[in-house]
Amino acid sequence: MTNPSEYILRTPDECYDDLPDYPFAPHYTEISGGLRVHYVDERPENASGETILLLHGEPTWSYLYRHVIPPLVAAGHRCVAPDLVGFGRSDKPAFRYGYTYQAHVDWLRETVFDALDLRDVTMVCHDWGGLLGLRLLAERPERFRRVIATNTLLPVGEPGEMGPFYVQWLQHSQRAYPFEPGAVVAHGALAEVEPAVQAAYNTPFPDESYLAGARQFPLLVPISPEDVASEPNRAAWAVLDKLQIPFLCAYGDHDAVTGPHGQRLAERIPGATAIMIPDAGHFVQEDQPGRLTEIITDFVAASSMTA
């Protein structure tokens, strides 16, 4: 039988030359299965602030945070933004069914805890970054100092949980050809996404064979209580329902898919609050990067004072 691990694709480094507003030096670590994971690691000269973990979602990569990282670093914070396996400059297994919800949790855990040994983390998690990051938060709450969740949720497969717009996205993600992440971002943002920026989002995926992870992600969202990921997510909620760290939900006010989940998330997690970001769709980092940065820095400062 063919070993799926033999089919690991790696987008050529030269593809990432001269991307708009993405000057960050690449960093890599190797995790189980010989997978190379890329991460941005930008630090101020005098690191007096926090370690901020920036998790992207589907179908983006660390490029999503290109306008958020520099001002956070200028404010004294270290910013770590990994590319999930299958995305960005990280390796991309071509065997589609090697991507599972649990595999993604394991890959991310190994990257941020085992390889990078991040502690006292301020996590900013977006979209699938939340579906994964909130699982890690439930597993290892002692590693986290605070959380800012943007346009995300932790579903358990209850009927109607994902809403009607998710069905449209699920169909598009499986049937569209070509499937272009840049066009997905442009559709989900309110602001105009320039062609060069759309091309940058497409860069990690030179052809269809590189898109296995991006195609598979939507199918991994639990939409039934019997889904393989539903019980682990319910177990995570048993921890999150009692969580005692600062938690903020900051959601775009024009996001039809995950927008309603901001308030629901805040209502379940003790002490959490929710705010809407005006004039922002699903990709708040594209629509309102300055406002999102202010929200992060203000929340870090306020929760540091009350800790």
Image (cartoon, rainbow, N blue to C red):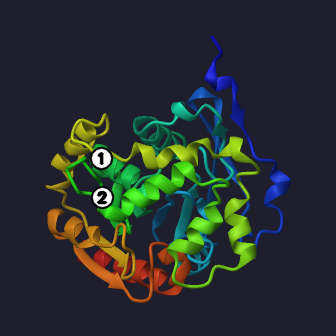
**Pick the front one: 172 or 230:** 172
Q: Is residue 131 left or right of residue 213?
A: left
Q: Which residue is mark 2?
A: 162
Q: Quadrant of the C terminus?
A: bottom left
Image coordinates for residue 46, horizontal then vertical, percent: 59, 73
Residue drawn 60% across the image and 41% down it: 212
Outermost residue, bottom side:
278
Sort mark 1 into few (<14), some (14-19) or many (20+) by Cα contacts within 10 Å: some
Q: Nearer the viewer, residue 164 or 235?
A: 164
Residue 221 in the image: above or below residue 144: above
Q: Position of residue 218 (x, y in %)?
A: 45, 49
Mark 1 and mark 2 residues within 8 Å of each other at the beta carbon: yes
Q: How many marks?
A: 2
Residue 275 sits in which quadrant?
Answer: bottom left
Which residue is located at x 64 percent, y 66 percent? 182
Image position, residue 207 (x, y; %): 75, 48
The amino acid pointed to by label 1 is Ile
Residue at (37% x, 67% y) in the render:
257
Element class at badge 1: loop
Q: Quadrant of the N terminus?
A: top right
In terms of secondary structure, where does tag 2 sit? Answer: loop
Label at residue 238: none
Q: Is residue 83 visible?
A: yes
- The quadrant in which residue 130 appears is bottom left
Label 2 packing within 10 angstroms: few (<14), some (14-19), many (20+): many
| Residue beneath the point at 60% across and 78% down | 67
Q: Is residue 42 visible?
A: no
Q: Position of residue 224 (x, y in %)?
A: 25, 43
Question: Tag 2 or tag 1, which sits nearer the N-term?
Answer: 2
114 left or right of 4 in image: left
Q: Which residue is mark 1?
A: 223
